[in-house]
Image (tube, rainbow, N blue to C red):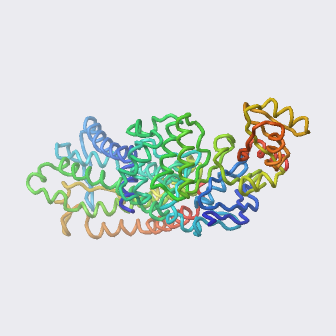
Amino acid sequence: MFPKVLKWEFLAGKRFYLVFVLYFLTLFSLGSYTSYIIQNVEHKTPDEYDIRPLTPGTMIDIVWEASDVWWFSFPVVIAYAVFTFSYELDKKILRTYLLSCVKKRTLFLAKLLSIQLGLFIPLIISLLIAYPLGDPILFGSNPLEVYVNLPRRLLLVASMLYIMVGISALSSTVFKNPLYAFAAPIAIVYTLNIAGLRVVSEYVPPQCYQDIIPGPIGLLTNEYFFSILSMALPAVIASTIALIIAYTIFIRRDIV
Amino acid sequence: MQDVISVENVWKVFGKTVALRNVSIKVSKGSVFLLMGPNGSGKSTLLKIVTGLIKPTRGHAEIFGANPWKERHKIFAYVGAMFEDHAPPDWASGKAYLEYKSILKKAENPEKEALAVARQFGVDTFWKQPFGTYSSGMKRKLALADAFINDPDLVILDDPTVALDKEARLALQEIVVNRAKQNKTCVIASHIITEFEHHATHLAFLNQGQTVITGKVEEVMNKMGIHKVTIKTNTPRKAAAILMKKGYAIKAYGNTIIVEGSEDANKIVKLLENLGIKAETEKPKANLWEMYTKALTSG
């Protein structure tokens, strides 16, 4: 039963494609926009940063520096999660669903997994495309090196998304008014953002590999990786608690 | 007869609103059970408790011997239900939706099952369009088809005929009657009285969240003091004149005469036959409007 429900939730029409389209629009349109107006680009290394002239291989720097994916993803992710879990927006469909042999538990888990997949598949695709575009010379000589730190980056972004999804799921099950359901997680995540959570999604472009000495080759050194992962940990735990509360409400709530 | 639904002393409170007060009803297998009452009387709330969508604040509800709140997913293998505001996602086509629901209700061949129920209500003529484009009547037909997936032993319908065209209403009535012959149960909640007047075997009247009266149609008529005899004759004018002369209160419709306040049909037939008028009795038909009015005013 679970795969069937997941498939239906996952392919729930426009929501999935909306996120998909927004990712690409954000990544690519902003990249080309800034390339027209910025003549120099910042290069970050763990120890310093300098400004170098814009070259074709630096587009990826501009994209990530300019858009700072976090800022664009957080309202999208929250909207997506709130739409999926909002009782008030979904209760007629929910009731129709539950007049069948589907367990509430199955439905909740399918919703949760569908959000994660709905966000991750476009994210992975966009990174797979964006990385070689960002450094075509390196990609031409050693394609795997471009992707060498992709799993680490995905793990960090996953924790970021998880935090947002957990808070949104709780908010949308607690607040029956959709406005509050949206406003609450946006306010919380915005505050977390100011508090430094955004660092989790920072990007160091492949061109800076040569500057990372010594340590493993890749976008993130071990030290830096674990440092930002530990920064995200309290929020990940808080998000897990939020999801447990959301689940409990979901299971016990009357479908009026 | 075996009870497929048993509701005992059920209360439901939403905030400060008491939606149901100590409601008790029993629905027997094979019956056509009409749940009647004005808007806000608690019909939908009661049916949502029975289908496990809502947890009763107090009291006990069972469906096929199971607690619907805890075992909803189990009972829906042999129960079908529709509610007033039935809504699949707008983007889903009726076909995809019915096939999906057939899977969720564990149909052996979901595609075949979906097509079978769609044909029953004429849904197959428009079911490839997305739900968002449907008229209210089309939405109701889809909801009805959904309720009858897997030919369930029990079907629970909340205001099923609203927005339906005549053909669909007749189709529904026919299905309900045929199901009763197969000893399958239908529970229908409505404030539109006439739709199932002649098919109901059991009744319950709700008013302001309370059961006013419940039982078999004949029992309810007796409990409410509604006694009448229906006579069919080829000389209705003459028969009516005689009965009026004898002091009976009557209503005449064509060849049918309803004698009110009387329980003894044979006595009246004999009286007419003695005066040379050929007459025969008919099974008393429930006049739901009369019962409904009486139930609400007496309650």
Q: Residue at x 55, y 39 (%)?
A: B170
Horizontal arrangement in the rendering, residue A149 relative to residue B144 (left or right)? left
Residue A62, x across and y down, in percent: 27, 45
Horizontal arrangement in the rendering, residue B158 relative to residue A3 (left or right)? right
| Quadrant in the picture for residue B27 | bottom right
Q: Is residue B211 above or below residue B85?
A: below
For this rendering, which residue is in front, A217 or B186? Answer: B186
Residue B57, x across and y down, in percent: 69, 64
For this rendering, which residue is in front, A30 or B81? Answer: B81
Residue closest to the far left: A141
Residue A213, x across and y down, in percent: 19, 66
Quadrant holding the N terminus of chain A: bottom left
For this rendering, which residue is in front, A108 or B101? Answer: B101
Q: Residue at x 48, y 58 (%)?
A: A100
Horizontal arrangement in the rendering, residue B139 relative to residue B130 (left or right)? right
Residue A196 is at least partly visible in this image: no
For this rendering, which residue is in front, B135 or B283? Answer: B283
Horizontal arrangement in the rendering, residue B45 relative to residue B97 (left or right)? right
Residue A19 is at least partly visible in this image: yes
Residue B23, x across and y down, in percent: 73, 60
Q: Residue at x 88, y 40 (%)?
A: B248
- Give the total number of marks visible in the rendering: 0
